[in-house]
């Protein structure tokens, strides 16, 4: 019997209505201008997310999220499983690349002010994705269960405690009790492999739909001048350029993962004193250093409380940035551009300072 | 429909009853979930240690014990009495360590220092180390929260 593929395709199309999506993708155009390069940061994040999903599932085949088994199971993955050390290394490095590209993506949008109407909600979902990505990193850091990751988690989960009333509740929720124990490890594993993936897919879906709905933004000065910006077909011209960038990034990631595989310390001991040189992942370093410079007490409250309040207010301000930076062409717009550059310099300086 | 002299319509009345009922139902479902997710773990009121393990301590010496899942630090004072501390930094919960050469407690996470009486002297810790009461009762060595009722 000969199967008519066209008929099969038409049958599915009748039921799933794929044609409009295909037609949309083939007709979609991407503007070309001096800032077009930043468009690629978005799809690069998707590349690293895909790598995280594949390598994460691979690691989860052998990982054991228990107090007794976690450190041993990571050691086993690294020493006994074929190329296991590389899978872990790629997962760890791809996380770093993903966060770096999320930050780059947001910085580019901040500086080019692409979040101006009608793209405010795209920015806000993007900010949510940054936070979710960082929580992914934070929960993943504990899973190897060595002495450094235990201390970093103790510090990180204790930070909400500085907030009166609700803080204690949040800390207990994160830890599964008053202290970091084996229950915390199991809980973090669940956040990392079940809850956060659901959350990131949901927010990402909205983010992507918004990007398609509003189209790509053009530079502010062209928009003000009402200049017609030349564009490139999304399929196949733009995709081809994206694929080339993906290949370069994949090559870079593989090279770094091969040469600089992460180490694994001895299994964490809940009773042992904190080891010297406790550091969180690099993207938390500037927050770590910020917490460190605040004095123990500032008047009636602890310095930690003041630091946490400032950090929360900053995050909220960045979330609502499109509404704060609502006159992008004027003086106020310049102020917010400089605020973004200042934030970047602050983060770099404090990160380096924390390593000294 | 509104009955004469009534404050609200029949529709609103019925919707409120239904809404209230659904809300109550939701709470009965959610509350056990919340209870399950926030476990009832509490730190101990007292721990019992074998006195023999700590009998040979010299004045000024510090030994560790398990205070629930946290480390405890037991110090023999110069006058022969015992003081116990919860060995957890009051800044951000890292485990502290005793530095015998400097006679200080040290937290490596953010470089916090406490003197030999557990008083915070340098770095970010906002409060002294938490103190516990230690006493020998026959063969047993008890460490208690200050003011905890004596069991035995």
Image (cartoon, rainbow, N blue to C red):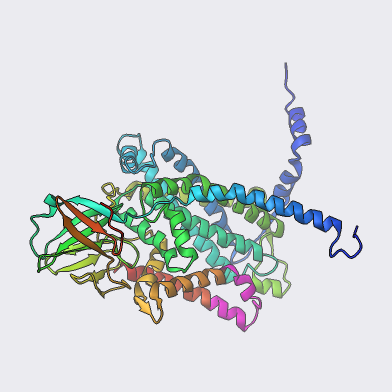
Check residue A330 for magenta coloring: yes
Residue A106: name its quadrant.
Answer: bottom right
Residue located at (35% from left, 50% from top): A181
In the picture, the quarter occupied by the N terminus of chain A is top right
- Per the picture, the main secondary structure of the magenta-coloured stretch is helix
Check residue A67 for magenta coloring: no
Residue A274: name its quadrant.
Answer: bottom left
Residue located at (38% from left, 54% from top): B42
* Residue sitting nearer the eye, A261 or B58: B58
Percent x, y of residue A329: 65, 78
Q: Is residue A96 visible?
A: no
* Horizontal side of residue A10 vs A86, given as left or right: right
Percent x, y of residue A102: 51, 59
Residue located at (84% from left, 62% from top): B8
Taking A46 as reference, is A294 above or below it? below
Q: Residue furthest top?
A: A1
Percent x, y of residue A351: 37, 68
Q: Residue furthest bottom?
A: A331
């Amino acid at each position: 019997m000969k199967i008519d593929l066209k008929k099969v395709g038409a049958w599915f199309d009748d039921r799933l209505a794929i044609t409009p999506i295909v037609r949309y993708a083939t007709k979609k155009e991407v503007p070309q201008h001096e800032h077009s390069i930043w468009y690629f940061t978005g799809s690069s994040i998707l590349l690293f997310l895909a790598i995280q999903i594949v390598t994460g599932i691979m690691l989860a085949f052998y990982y054991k999220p228990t107090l007794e088994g976690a450190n041993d199971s990571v050691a086993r993955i690294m020493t006994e499983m074929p190329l296991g050390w590389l899978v872990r290394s790629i997962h760890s490095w791809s996380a770093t690349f993903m966060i770096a590209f999320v930050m780059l993506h947001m910085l580019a949008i901040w500086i080019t002010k692409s979040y101006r109407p009608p793209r405010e909600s795209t920015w806000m979902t993007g900010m949510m994705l940054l936070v979710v990505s960082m929580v992914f990193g934070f929960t993943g850091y504990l899973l190897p269960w060595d002495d450094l990751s235990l201390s970093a988690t103790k510090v990180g989960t204790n930070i909400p405690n500085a907030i009166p009333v609700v803080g204690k509740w949040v800390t207990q929720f994160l830890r599964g009790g008053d202290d970091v124990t084996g229950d915390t490890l199991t809980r973090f594993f669940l956040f990392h492999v079940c809850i956060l993936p659901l959350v990131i897919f949901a927010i990402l879906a909205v983010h992507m739909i918004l990007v398609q709905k509003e189209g790509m933004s053009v530079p502010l000065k062209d928009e003000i001048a009402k200049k017609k910006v030349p564009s490139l077909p999304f399929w196949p011209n733009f995709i081809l350029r994206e694929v080339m960038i993906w290949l370069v990034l994949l090559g870079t990631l593989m090279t770094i993962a091969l040469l600089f595989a992460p180490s694994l310390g001895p299994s964490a001991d809940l009773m042992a004193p904190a080891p010297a040189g406790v550091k969180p992942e690099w993207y938390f370093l500037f927050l770590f250093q910020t917490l460190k410079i605040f004095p123990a007490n500032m008047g009636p409250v602890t310095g930690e409380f003041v630091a946490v309040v400032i950090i929360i207010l900053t995050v909220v301000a960045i979330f609502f940035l499109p509404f704060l930076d609502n006159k992008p062409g004027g003086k106020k717009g310049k102020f917010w551009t400089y605020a973004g550059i200042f934030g970047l310099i602050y983060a770099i300086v404090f990160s380096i300072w924390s390593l000294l | 429909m509104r009955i004469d002299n009534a404050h609200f319509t029949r529709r609103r009345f019925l919707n409120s009853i239904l809404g209230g009922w659904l809300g109550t139902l939701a709470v009965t479902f959610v509350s056990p979930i919340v209870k399950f997710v926030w476990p009832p773990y509490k730190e101990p009121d007292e721990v019992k240690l074998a006195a023999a393990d700590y009998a040979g301590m010299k004045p000024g010496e510090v030994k560790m014990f398990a205070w629930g899942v946290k480390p405890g630090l037991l110090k023999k004072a110069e006058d022969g009495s015992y003081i116990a501390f919860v060995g957890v930094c009051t800044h951000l919960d890292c485990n502290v360590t005793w530095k015998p050469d400097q006679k200080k407690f040290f937290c490596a996470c953010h470089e916090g220092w406490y003197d030999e009486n557990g008083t915070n002297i340098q770095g970010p810790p906002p409060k002294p180390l938490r103190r516990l009461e230690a006493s020998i009762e026959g063969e047993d060595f008890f460490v208690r929260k200050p003011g905890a009722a004596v069991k035995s």
